Each structure stands twice: as structure tokens, then as C-alpha cells.
Amino acid sequence: MLCSPNNPAGLVHDPSEPRAPVTWAAGHGIWIVSDETCVDLGFRPVTAPGRVEPAMADRLVTIGGVSKSFAMTGWRAGRMSGPEHVIEAATAVQSHTTSNVGRIAQAAALTGPDVSAGFRATLRDRLRLCACVLEPLGLYQTPPDGAFYVLPGARRFHPDDIAVADRLLSAGVVTVPGTSFGAPGHLRLSLAVEEAQLRKGLRLTADVLNDWAG
């Protein structure tokens, strides 16, 4: 499975990075699932595996949606593309295991205006806000290339990211320990909140960590 932009780091793979595994998969009959849920929220171009290796097309399944790019994460509206026999099988499974997409989400996704460009601009503004607060704390080493997460390293405050997350939680700031994503020593912060909430959360984060470091 390839995920670009990635969750939780927001990493967008350069075309050269997936070429080796995609080419290897094409030569060994391996299937690839490309998770492009945040593809419209990339801050630089996102390359699809099928463009890296066209021969992969008959064993490539692409999944995505508009729940995140249209800023409606609570309304699950996804999409899937791939070889016809795979989509038919997936449709048969889905029809008996989950409910259909809500009518409101369908209308917003299929007939509503494309709001992803405006949302992307909003996220850029929020990233700049994060940088202003997190850089002085040494927590903005690797800015994301896309999506709406920041994954700062927090080891300078404590080697256990869960301890840091608990400390912040006690002050009212909700983060997710990087350990949950295989990235120990980091915290995942979400930008998908109201700007006032983000400002308050960043201010509290700075206060808590500055006191801790002091």
C-alpha cells in the first residue's frame, strides 16, 4: 500500500521514490493499493503509481474520496478505481457489509462546487501559524507536503511521546502519540479545526512545553 500525501506525516513522495517498489511489484505480480485520500490537499504535485509504471495498471487499485479534500470528514464519501473484476467484487462485498453513502454527502461530492482549492489555501495559512509557534520550540523540523497534519518530534521534552501527549491532554490539548503510527517520539497535530481552536491549542502547547523545559 502506498499513501501520498501520507498520514500522519503529510509526506508527498517524489516520483523517484515509489519507482523501485512499483517496478518490482509490476515484475512480480504484486498488487498495489494507492491511498490518495488527500491527493487534492498536496502542497506540491502528487504522482500516482500508474504514472510511475503504466504496466502496473492491471494490478493497481486506487482509493480516495472527498471527505477530507472537501472539508467534510464526518461525511464518509469515498471512491475506488481499478480493474473491472476487482471493482465488481468490492461492490458485492460493500453492498452487504456497509450502508450506502448518505444523500447529503453524495450531493456535496458530485454536484457541489469544488472547495478543495480554498481548503488547501486555508491549510497553508494554518501551517504558517503552526510554524510561528512550533519553530521556537524546535517542533517544526519537517513541514508536511500535504494533508492537514503536523508530526513534530518531541523527544527534547521527554523520550516517551505518550507522556508528552498526556501532559498536553491535562492542559486541554488533544494530540495523538506518534507511537500509534509507528513514529515514536513524535506527536500528530491536526489542522482540521477552527482557527480559534488551533490558536488556543498552540498557545497552550507552547505554555506547557516551555514550563516543562524550564
Image: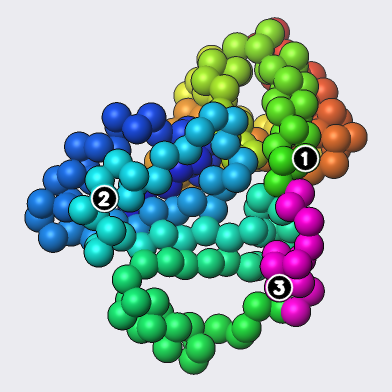
- Which region is colored magenta? 103-115
Marks 1/3: CA–CA distance: 20 Å
Residue 106: mark = 3
Q: Nearer the viewer, mark 3 or mark 2?
A: 2
Residue 159: mark = none
Three-letter code for the amino acid on which mark 1 is drawn:
Gly
x and y percent of residue 54 in the render?
A: 26, 50
| For marks 1 and 2 on the same chain, the one whose residue lies earlier in the sequence | 2
- In the rendered view, would you say 205 is above or below 97? above
Most extreme residue toward the bottom, as rendered? 96
x and y percent of residue 10 in the render?
A: 53, 35
Q: Nearer the viewer, mark 1 or mark 2?
A: 2
The residue where tag 2 is placed is 54
Label 1 environment density (alpha carbons within 10 Å; few <14, some 14–19, many ≥20): few
Quadrant occupied by the C terminus: top right
Q: For residue 114: magenta? A: yes
Residue at the location (85% across, 35% down)? Answer: 195
The residue where tag 1 is placed is 118
What secondary structure is marked by label 2?
helix
Are the residues flagged by discs 1 and 2 in contact, CB closer than 8 Å? no
Q: Is residue 60 visible?
A: yes
x and y percent of residue 206 in the render?
A: 75, 19
Asked where in the image residue 31 lies, by quadrant, the reply is bottom left
